Image (cartoon, rainbow, N blue to C red):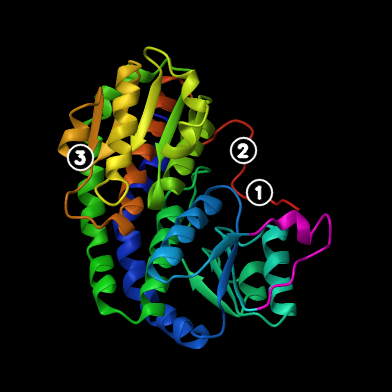
Amino acid sequence: MTGQILEKEIHEQPLILRELIDKEGANISRIAKSIRGNFHHVMIAARGTSDNAARYAQYLFGIQNKLPVALATPSIYTLYQRPPNLSDTLMIGISQSGQSPDIVAVIEEGKRQGQPTIGLTNDTTSPLAEAADHVINLHAGYERAIAATKTYTASLVSFAMLSAYLNGDPIPLSLIQKIPGLLDQTIDDASQRIPSFERYRDMEQCAVIGRGYNYGTSFEISLKITELTRILALPYSSADFQHGPIAMVQEGFPVVVVAPKGQVLDDMRDIAKILSVRHAELIVISNDPDLLGQAQLAIPIPVKCEEWLSPILTVIPGQLFALSLARLRGLDPDKPAGLSKVTETW
């Protein structure tokens, strides 16, 4: 069966995150102490899957640390060579390989302007690691599958730990410790529903909707579906979806709704009701029984999960869904056509 490498790496994630939490906590604590009070804004440079992790960080640092967070536009630094004024800004670069020249260029410019810089990478000898003042090792081990899975969730956990250490609050750190166990449960529950995924083998397009902390999850699940299955998957926030894109929803149109309990749940319930009226095919990832009950395909996540940590769990059903659909469509999930593991962009 194809996709054995990707499947193995999806199932490795609980162990990987436990190792990350145990081995990198002291380093992230040291980094937080070193940079605390030295910035008032955060700018994050990333591409692809790493950019989706950055979207999570926008909400995480904005809500938990009250910091304004921007996503960098690397071409300003490379192609246009007109970098902005980065005063009072913490610069963070995310790259699994640490190789992409445009991400490295953003971090180098931040350092040139005297700003604190952090690199999140799975390769601590990479150009990104060499450029940054501080390095957070993702501890994901060698990721063989082209589609990133364990480096993505490791990036989310690294951000969660950095946020908690910046606040100096032990309670969030204790909640992070529980994530590997909850992830095990999520993988088990989602795996039991794999036979139901065959219903969607012939779909050609879908939408993926999330909001708040899970806005980035909608992008990451969309990316996994598109790169592994060649199905056009479009990500939206529930708010943006109602400003036009909802017009494409007709009877049977598949919509993945990512909606764990939290501040945005009522909004997600409302959009699910609107979609139901339009007879959309609802695929719901949630820990809310009422919302799960509205779905044609319901994929639960553990009830005892804080909203701010839920993206680490909610992406898992999306990974398994994309893996399974690729297999059903006769594609090799380990080797998506036209893609390579390391992509260098300028």
Spot occupied by residue 284 in the image (x, y as percentages of width and height): 29, 33
Q: Nearer the viewer, residue 208 or 342?
A: 208
Name the quadrant containing residue 98.
bottom right
Image depth: mark 2 or mark 3 in front: 3
Q: Please tell me which of labels 1 and 3 falls first in the chain.
A: 3
- Which residue does the image show at 37% across and 79% down from the upper left? 167
Spot occupied by residue 190 in the image (x, y as percentages of width and height): 25, 37
Marks 2 and 3 sit apart, C-alpha to C-alpha, by: 30 Å
Spot occupied by residue 262 in the image (x, y as percentages of width and height): 27, 51
Looking at the picture, which amino acid does disc 2 mark? Leu
Kindly tell me whether residue 153 is visible in this rendering: yes
Marks 1 and 3 sit apart, C-alpha to C-alpha, by: 33 Å
Asked whether the residues under the numbered discs 1 and 3 touch, taking CB atoms below 8 Å apart as contact, a structural biologist would say no
Asked whether the residues under the numbered discs 1 and 2 touch, taking CB atoms below 8 Å apart as contact, a structural biologist would say yes
Residue carrying label 3? 189
Residue carrying label 1? 343
Q: Is residue 136 above or below residue 13?
A: below
Looking at the picture, which amino acid does disc 3 mark? Asp
Q: Nearer the viewer, residue 185 or 172?
A: 172
Determine if the magenta segment contains residue 234.
Answer: no
Q: State the extent of the magenta-drawn residues as a range.
A: 72-87
Element at badge 3? helix
Position of residue 43 in the picture relative to residue 198 (left or right): right
- Which residue does the image show at 44% across and 46% down from the upper left? 215
Q: Is residue 333 above or below residue 112?
A: above
Residue carrying label 2? 339
Marks 1 and 2 sit apart, C-alpha to C-alpha, by: 8 Å
